[in-house]
Amino acid sequence: MAGMQQQLDFIAYIQRMLNEGDFSATYKFALLHAIADVCIEHPLQQPDSELVITLDELVDKFILLYWHHAMPFAAGSNGDAALLKQNTGKQSKVISVLYECQQNDIRNIRQLKDSPYWKQIYRATLATLKDGPLWRLQILAKQAECFLYPHSNNGKFIKLNAGIAYSFRRFYDLVVYLAKNAWLQKIQSIKDNQQLLGAQSQLHEFLFGVDRNALNKARPILIEIQRGLCFYCNKPLKATHSADVDHFIPFARYSTDLGHNFVATHSSCNNSKRDYLAAQQHRDNWQQQNLVKFEKVLSTELAAYFYCDATKSLAVSDWAYSVAQANGAKLWLNKDEFVIAGSKPVATVQLATTEIIAANDTNADTLELNPVNTNSLKLRYFPNIKIACGHFKTGDDSGVEYLDAPLGFGSLNPDKHFLAHASGNSMNGGKQPILDGQLLLLELITPQSAGSLQNCTVAIERQDVSGDNQYLLRDVKKIADGEYQLIAKNPGYPPLIADESMRTFARLKGIVE
């Protein structure tokens, strides 16, 4: 596990990197920011997991981070002279190529990817990444200290060392804050920029701010799917043209516009929520609205303006709420009212408590509820359900026990999440193997709440000829004619074709140490 000492070492290393590294350009700050973003966009199965990050992912992040930087800063200057420099020499190749694209009426990243310019900008950015920051980021005081990832130039990916992705997730706010401020100071220190900057105090907003024009594109579709109601208070948006578009996961926490991360609100609700995370009930509503019911609508309508990936939006929200729960942070419920992250509504806790009593006493109907300990969330554990990593395995949900909810997996709900052991070796393969006997954290799903299961690891239930339940864990892959394959990570186990006897009942959320 990524222990306290490793986390302290991580912070110390980031501090040393910014103090002892050679930053002749801003690329290293961009790379640090990009790695932090990717870490929270990937669900982390175990705190000590390694994480493979492809160079394609980093190229996408670089282009996204530098897109606004390639716009003219000074209205009174023309052409390249209006662009802020990112290094002490000539203008950076990435900025020059992006600026050229924008001059040819490319207005956003989606248009760029669909244009003839994409190959050119991709090659230029990849070359910049490989030639400089990727292998220079970890050079401290002229010596390579590969604390984050090994310097093994295979040309396709980097692999973060064990526990590093967890530390990036744990300290994302701090890392991004430090990277942005160092980036800002670097641009201010470049002599060629000082005439453009003058006495301006809006540099941070220019480099890292919200694209308000793009947000306006999201307003009509959000109002439509919300039936003209404010997302938070559920009251009518009287003047729809002036309704606010709020980043559900605050922009101050994660500064990338994802198309599924927006909701329409009253200005008063938005101003009250500010940069707080919303309470769990708002999060549940957001997931149901944006990631399930209207996931495809938002992807279709907003893809021209924003990056749309519901899975990534869910991963970012899981990260944000897991940090909030670990820190005991306050979540915004409504105006001037907050709840503590991880606390449960009274009705939900009482239901869980009733189940615990019933599981341990046959005369539970005659008992009164015991006081609830909201500081120790319990999840159901089924010792007789073995989620087979091989062939279907018979089991039953009798003998339920209760275990402390594991930390580091976001906000958990005892009505939805449960624990069971893996059995067999078919999932023992790939980058994140599941081993025989490991304890699994699973989330119950229904046809209405499942969303897309493509490339997810899911638990499947069926009944054998005698009527006993059988369970199986596999990855889901859609194939021709609307059929689905159930894929094992271990190539020694052939794929299965899903049939009508099988019911997908849970999604794998993670492996518990």
Image (cartoon, helix red, strand yellow):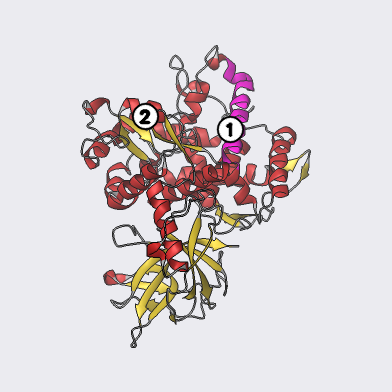
Instruction: Count the numbered circles shown.
Output: 2
Q: Which residues are magenta?
A: 171-194
Residue in the foreground of this view, choosing between 384 and 465: 384
Number of the front mark, 1 or 2: 2
**Which residue position holds label 1?**
177
Would you say residue 179 sits in the magenta stretch?
Answer: yes
Quarter placement of the C terminus: bottom right
Residue in the foreground of this view, choosing between 461 and 290: 461
The amino acid marked with disc number 2 is: Asn
What distance separates the C-alpha of mark 1 from that of mark 2?
A: 23 Å
Rate crowding at label 1 as few (under 14), some (14 to 19) or many (20 or more) other CA atoms within 10 Å: some
Q: Is residue 293 visible?
A: yes
The amino acid marked with disc number 1 is: Tyr
Q: Residue at x 33, y 57 (%)?
A: 451
Prevalent SS, magenta region: helix
Q: Position of residue 277 (x, y in %)?
A: 45, 37
Rate crowding at label 2 as few (under 14), some (14 to 19) or many (20 or more) other CA atoms within 10 Å: many
**Which residue position holds label 2?**
270
Residue in the foreground of this view, choosing between 303 and 98: 303
Q: Is residue 426 depicted above or below 249 in this figure?
A: below
Q: Is residue 307 visible?
A: no
Would you say residue 255 sits in the magenta stretch?
Answer: no
Q: Quadrant of residue 211?
A: top left
Q: Quadrant of residue 33?
A: top right
Q: Residue at x 30, y 28 (%)?
A: 266
Q: In screen coordinates, is 196 left or right of 132? A: left
Q: Residue furthest front?
A: 366
Quarter placement of the N terminus: bottom right
Q: Residue at x 49, y 76 (%)?
A: 389
Q: Position of residue 398 (x, y in %)?
A: 44, 74
Kindly check if marks 1 and 2 are in contact, taking CB atoms under 8 A apart as contact. no
Which one is earlier in the sequence, the residue at label 1 or at label 2? 1
